[in-house]
Image: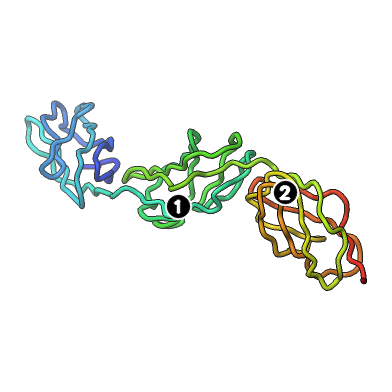
Amino acid sequence: MPINPDQGSTGGGSEVTFSGTGLADATAVLFGAKPAAITANTATSVSVVAPSGAGVVDAMVRTPGGTSNPVPFYYLPPPVVVAVSPSSGPVAGGGTVTVTGRGLATTTSVAFGATDVTPTVVSDSELTLVSPAHAAGAVSLVVTAQGGTATASGTFGFVGVPTATGFSPLTGLPAGGTLVGITGTRLSTITGVTFGGVPATFAVLSDTEVAAIAPSHPLGAVTVALTTTGGSATAPGVYLYLIG
């Protein structure tokens, strides 16, 4: 006798449907020794709300005509979220997010605040998903699996596109090594700084200031660009590599 789904939360509450014949006027549905609440019943199906439980139990339907053959029902513990990376993304959506934890194999959705997305299940310990469009701000991130739900510690931040308003000094040696201060807005989630496309070592000082060490580069003028989880920006003007 088919049962769908054949697994659910240890806390109970899963909606389960038994299919078969001779199921009319079901008097009881048992999950192990525990009765389930019957919500719908026809001659070919019985729908119930599974009780709480653990492990694997035999589920069966009782009718005036007898008891069905037992079928296994698997109780799953609730999922656990250990980490979310990155912890922020662009307000326009489209950011790739990785969720790691335990019990994630049966995940059906991930909610960013009130917005649900369907993840890709990589393994029982990893999900990948694409963040939705959302207004700027912080929201909770909740994973829903057949074993229950789990809320990530902390929040997920939706970040606007950054701006780069300037930098100083404006020149440096081709060998690199010059400490350059870059100013702008929405810089706290910065993930990269480049000088003419060459990555630079950087440190976030505040949401409006970043310090970077100019990398080595041939003589000439280059642009200074920033990338954050909210997007990217290019500073006005150029940085000049000069021989001192």
- Crowding around mark 2 (Cα neighbors within 10 Å: few <14, some 14 to 19, many 20+) is some
Disc 1 crowd rating (10 Å Cα; few below 14, some 14-19, many 20+) is: some
Identify the secondary structure beneath mark 2: strand
In front of the other: 51 or 101: 101
Residue 39 in view (yes/no): yes
Three-letter residue code for mark 1: Val
Horizontal side of 117 relative to 95 (left or right) equals: left
Relative placement, left or right, of 216 versus 27 is: right
Please, what secondary structure does the residue beneath circle 1 have? strand
Q: Mark 1 points at which residue?
A: 121
- Taking the spot 10% from the left edge, 43% from the top edge, the residue there is 33
In this rendering, which labeled residue sits more in front, label 1 or label 2?
2
Could you tell me residue 207's position as x and y percent? 66, 47
Residue at 21% in and 32% down: 46
Quarter occupied by residue 52: top left
Q: Nearer the viewer, residue 224 or 206?
A: 206
